[in-house]
Amino acid sequence: MVLNNYSKQNPEIKAEPSNLAYILYTSGSTGVPKGVQIEHHSLYNLLLSVQKLPGLAKKDKLLAITTISFDISIAELFLPLITGAELVLTDSATTKDGSALLDIIKNEHITFIQATPVTFKIMLEAGWDGLLDMKVVCTGEPLPKDLAIKLTSRCTALYNMYGPTETTIFSTGKQIKATDELITIGKPVDNTLIYIVGDDGQQVPEGETGEIYIAGEGVARGYFKKPDLTAERFVADPFSGNAGDRMYRTGDLGKVLPDGDIQCFGRIDSQVKIRGYRIELSEIEFILSQQKNIKEAVVLSLKNRAGDLRLVAYVVQTSSKTETAATEIQGWKAALKNSLPIFMVPNDFVLLDALPLTSNGKIDRNALPNPEINIDTTLSSYVAPRTKLEKMIADIWSQCLKVENIGINDTFFDLGGHSLTAVQVITRIKNETGKRIRFANFFEYPTVEKIAAFLENDKKEPVKSLVAIKPEGTKVPLYIVHGNGSTAFKFMNFAYQLDTDQPVFCLQAIGIDGYVEPLDNIKDIAASYVSEVIAHNPHGPYSLAGYSFGGIIAFEMAQQLRTKGKTVTMLAMCEGYVIDNYQLEPGLYKTLHRIYTRGRKFLFGFYLLTSEPKRTVRFKINTLKAYINELAGKEVMKEDKLDLDLEFIDKVAEIHHKAVSKYRLKPYDGTVYVFRAAKRSFFIDDFVNLGWIPYARSVKVLDIDGEHMSIFEPPWNKKFARLLQQTLDECNKGLVYESAAGYQNIPVAVL
């Protein structure tokens, strides 16, 4: 029976840009499926944008190889339809066969293909070695540089596209060329905004790392029937200036480069914390992947037998294995030290033929082999201890560092050594041999062999304050003066945040090791330090920085150097401040001023408590604990800092405190650069210029992150290092360091 009573009128269609185009389920990094709701205007915007970059035209033939459960399949299906291009479909078996894919591409004259890096690796392994007239779009996973180099010579154009499902397929993109030093994710697609946001919810400066937020037309409606998760990930956009605008928290780390490109480091949830430092594993992986003869790299944090976390790098090499494994690994470590703080350099390396993959072509980190975490004697230049003393030192290091099989050429810092373990080693060596080594010895004699030779020599060396933290480089050296009771360890990781060719030296307090009595006069302390600096660098000029109490010493050093006819190009105060009352002559006014200051200090404590109660209470509790432990005669250790209080450090700190209270500043005919922390934990007389205005020809204040005790620690030290390096470069423009031989282009203008 045929029914003929259908209406002859076309149905009314009320399609709006805000209607749903599709819901696609994705588990993302959580493993819990969630439906992402993409609206028509978002998809329409993306398709029009991709028509331009990477670009698809009517003459093209696109090979669709992606399963419908992944969002890039949406682009594969709809792009040809809106451009008039030809669409060629394949089955799932063909997509896993590199030879079959190459046959289809050649036989069908395919001009456009998009896939994850794994697909292109399969095609290369199947024999793809000639040039194909085809655009290649890599997406879904980071594009390794080694793969990019191979692809650029085998296709007419290579594109790297980035974007989570929640922001409609692609959010950024870039054509990759063989000459590119870095593989970036490029710039935003049309009508898309990218923000790099710090922990404080504000956009970070160019070059700083933060979380990638995406705003604009591509942002999804949210997750289907998951309002709480939607509210967590899709948040208000405070940067657009338009009410109702939203942005998506990707959970990826990135930064904006000077050319506007975005560098993506991977998931923020790859962060780990080792010895108090927050470490981005993806950032280490990225730097590793740029090194010679590394095809792919993954970094994990694993526990050794003692339960301590260590960084382990899993590396797949390229085919050109020209050096031994030990030589190769040492080269990688050296390269990493030039780009990353020491605490981010992996302790151990595991060489693999290939990284394990999941069913959808992504790296399966859970399937990586779990090695016995120690120094692998087959992969390191291991030389066993030869003498009784070397064996004793290696055993002490092994027990303190929780690392087995320590050879005589292994360095204290490469094994994960820091100030706390240094103290343990000093104590153990003293108990075993009756001889005391100093903090500076770990920098001068960093291997078992060298420290053993030093102890065996038993030569009375003059006690020095100058410590070479990072002696290599062609720039004018930076001399950092210690804070009250701090050691050179405090500045070690900060030094590696500065430029690769920036030498850094530290002046450590006299008496801190218990060898000699500490000096109790600022002028005498400064004179001692000046003599060491001139002995190290006779001709100058000199760039000085003082941390906290050390700012006063650096100030006096600059005055004494000027008196000797030397040139001081930079004098920096790293949270170094002047206490007004110390500069007053004894008498009634000084007494009244002290009472007035104590009143302000008391009121400021209430201000801190109301404005930042958690941080203030934590600071006060830690201070009280330290005081109680000190009264009880216990050793006080600052567990979350690089330094710790020992009997000698406490003694030196007390003497230095009295010394600074007696020192009178005289005006300095130059610029004082004040690096001022964003947050205050205690009262000072002048919060703006830290008290330096009356004592300098000019004062330049530069704001940095963190608070007084944390400015040298990550992540706050990144901005600090960048600003300090800029200041150093400006003050020392045109100068080249030539070690003890002096400098080129002298004389230099005094700033």
Image: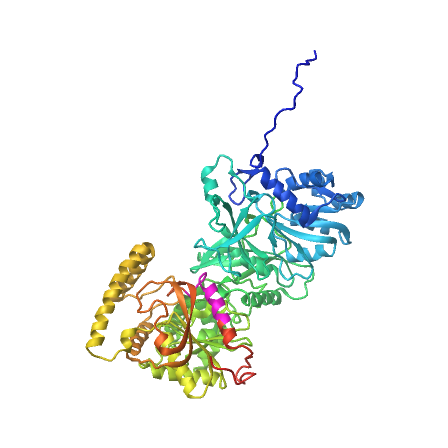
Q: Is residue 111 visible?
A: yes
Which quadrant is home to the N terminus? Answer: top right
Image side of residue 200 versus residue 735, left or right:
left
Image side of residue 446 versus residue 42, left or right:
left
Q: Nearer the viewer, residue 584 or 534?
A: 584
In which image quadrant can residue 179 be found? bottom right
In which image quadrant can residue 523 be found? bottom left
Q: Position of residue 439 (x, y in %)?
A: 41, 74
Question: Furthest residue to the right?
Answer: 107
- Magenta range: 711-726
Image side of residue 551 versus residue 133, left or right:
left
Q: Position of residue 704 (x, y in %)?
A: 43, 64
In which image quadrant can residue 467 be found? bottom left
Q: Nearer the viewer, residue 587 or 455?
A: 587
Name the magenta segment's main secondary structure.
helix
Is 413 above or below relative to 26? below
Q: Position of residue 647 (x, y in %)?
A: 31, 72
